[in-house]
Amino acid sequence: MKRMNIKYIGLIAGMIMTLSSCADLLNQEPTVDLPSSNYWKTESDAESALNGLVSDIRWLFNRDYYLDGMGEFVRVRGNSFLDSKGRDGRAYRGLWEISPIGYGGGWSEMYRYCYGGINRANYVIDNVERMIANTSNEKVVKNLESIIGECKLMRALVYFRLITMWGDVPYIDWRVYDNSEVDKLSRTPLVEVKNHILDDLQYAFDKLPEKASVRGRFSQPAALALRGKVELYWACWNHFGWPELDTFTPNEEEAKKAYKAAAEDFRKVIDDYGLTLFRNGEPGECDELGKADKLPNYYYLFLPTANGDGEFVLAFNHGGTNTGQGDQLMRDLAGRSIENSQCWVSPRFEIADRYQSTVTGEYCAALVKLNPASVPDARTQPNSAVNPESYKNRDYRMKASIMWDYEVCQGLMSKKVTGWVPYIYKMWGSEVTINGETYMSYNTDGTNTGYVFRKFVRNYPGEERADGDFNWPVIRLADVYLMYAEADNAINGPQPYAINLVNKIRHRGNLPPLVSNKTATSEAFFEAIKQERIVELLGEGQRVFDTRRWREIEKVWCEPSGKGVKMYDTYGAQVAEYYVNQNSLAYERCYIFQIPESERNRNPNLTQNKPYR
């Protein structure tokens, strides 16, 4: 399949980079614009503009693994928002140690750059619409309408991000050229923005092809999947409530309609386009403990081997080596022994017990935290977190996602293989002997949990730490399966079709199907769906949005004024403590984010969300 050229192109590049550098909300006031007399004449011009827009919007989503730092299963100790080669992640700037509490006020850059992306989408839409008005060639019109469809899909995606974080936000669907056009705009009610998003996605669905002809472009399933997700969130807000957004009144009838609409869209994605899970959802091979010659298929889903696969319903691609547009995954998730990566992001101890037994399909006995320095037999005690045998016969996604003591991965340096490196917590870059062979242990000095990620970390040479060309998934087919099951269950209770979809997700982990008591009631099935979302989507930026839309922050952590939740490493040392004696306001500020005060200072008509007044 031909790969889309995602490099910035000529004057388009200059225009977009200039827009990105401005400091105000919409990043407007470019010093260079593209006059229609010189540009916007051919389909090639429109294609170039679209490619630049895709490249720009990508930076708003491709480091969403940072967002998992707001949840209970991933620690984010910092980020590489902008590296020495200028690869851009400025939307995430200002978020260093991302904590599960107090994060609602730290996303001013994301807010601002979202509007920059919207403004650029509007710029392309406006000009391509003018091109359509000036041609009678039906084939050209169809192609240009498809380009507008992709732009509207991206505009919808960005607005969806805005409303999930801030609720009511100003809605702008025109290209802004002067600050005076927006300096007095009020926030648009949530329902109106949601309806505009759905209108954009309906247009996109109508105009996009069933299958993209070029990798990195969008098609009908992407529009349907995103529309279903918007409807699902709308259903949740109406069913579970959103009291922190005091301009919104939940309505149970609205919730039922939205659950039904979401299920219908997800069902079409699943049934109508011939899409399948990566490698048909088969688990593949899983090497024995302490080896990594054969890794499960789930591991390869998060390498470029899966680029262009049908499981990636909505994804943004990267340019790889020498493009300045490589992904940052390995740099952020791997340790020093792999191209001198920095291990900004690591799994917490708490995720390990979520991986179920391939024998019983149930949870295994809880891992016991033991320090080998003070407990001589810690590495042999049953269920010890530092005993490799405790991880035997687990969900294959565990081996594919995280590493525990004496697991190995491929060392890489200067684009070359350096040999196997065993991970041993707190033994960073040391000489170790295992079964008579000597190794240098994996240097992951950035983790304090006892685990590191294998998911997203490349195991082959040839690319620097920030030169990956992986297609970052915004919506995967597995996510669609689980969202369909959730939406259908909310209306109809557990149904065979939905249960089968969840079992397909479990099968990729080599788990047996759900037992009958897991599907006996809608409540039980919902819990099974939640469990699959945790392990299937780990590190993909979904968990925090799930707990917020389900109103489960208090359930995940503790009730207001509670004693808090202590978090530990595999040795039993306390590494963090959250929600200690926190009042209700602290929780409210996790359910909705703060409208940036810098924007309110510039625009007196922007009201502030309730928990920040």
Image (cartoon, rainbow, N blue to C red):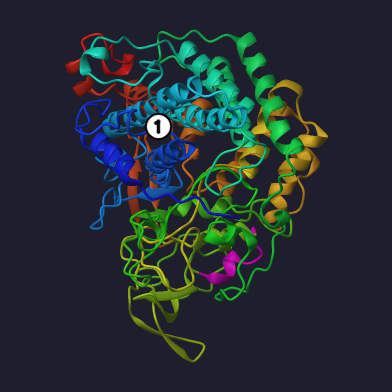
Reply above or below: 340 against 446.
below
Q: Quadrant of the C terminus?
A: top left
In magenta segment, residue 297: no
Reply above or below: 560 against 248.
below
Residue 471: percent from the left, percent from the top?
50, 51
Q: Is residue 596 visible?
A: yes
Q: How many marks?
A: 1
Reply above or below: 341 against 477.
below
Mark 1 is on which residue type? Trp
In this view, the residue in front, 183 or 356, is 183
Q: Quadrant of the N terminus?
A: bottom right
Residue 388: percent from the left, percent from the top?
54, 70
In this view, the residue in front, 59 or 37, is 37
Q: Which residue is mark 1?
A: 40
Residue visible at 56% across and 23% down? 136
Residue visible at 50% across and 58% down? 455
Residue 270: percent from the left, percent from the top?
72, 38
**How many other residues sit within 10 Å of disc 1, few (<14), some (14-19) or many (≥20)?**
many
Q: Is residue 104 visible?
A: no
Residue 396 image-quadrant placement: bottom right
Horizontal arrangement in the rendering, residue 141 relative to residue 182 (left or right): right
Residue 318: percent from the left, percent from the top?
44, 53
Residue 447 image-quadrant placement: bottom left
SS under mark 1: loop
Horizontal arrangement in the rendering, residue 596 relative to residue 157 (left or right): left
Horizontal arrangement in the rendering, residue 480 relative to residue 521 (left or right): left
Residue 610 image-quadrant placement: top left
Residue range in magenta is 387-395
In magenta segment, residue 393: yes
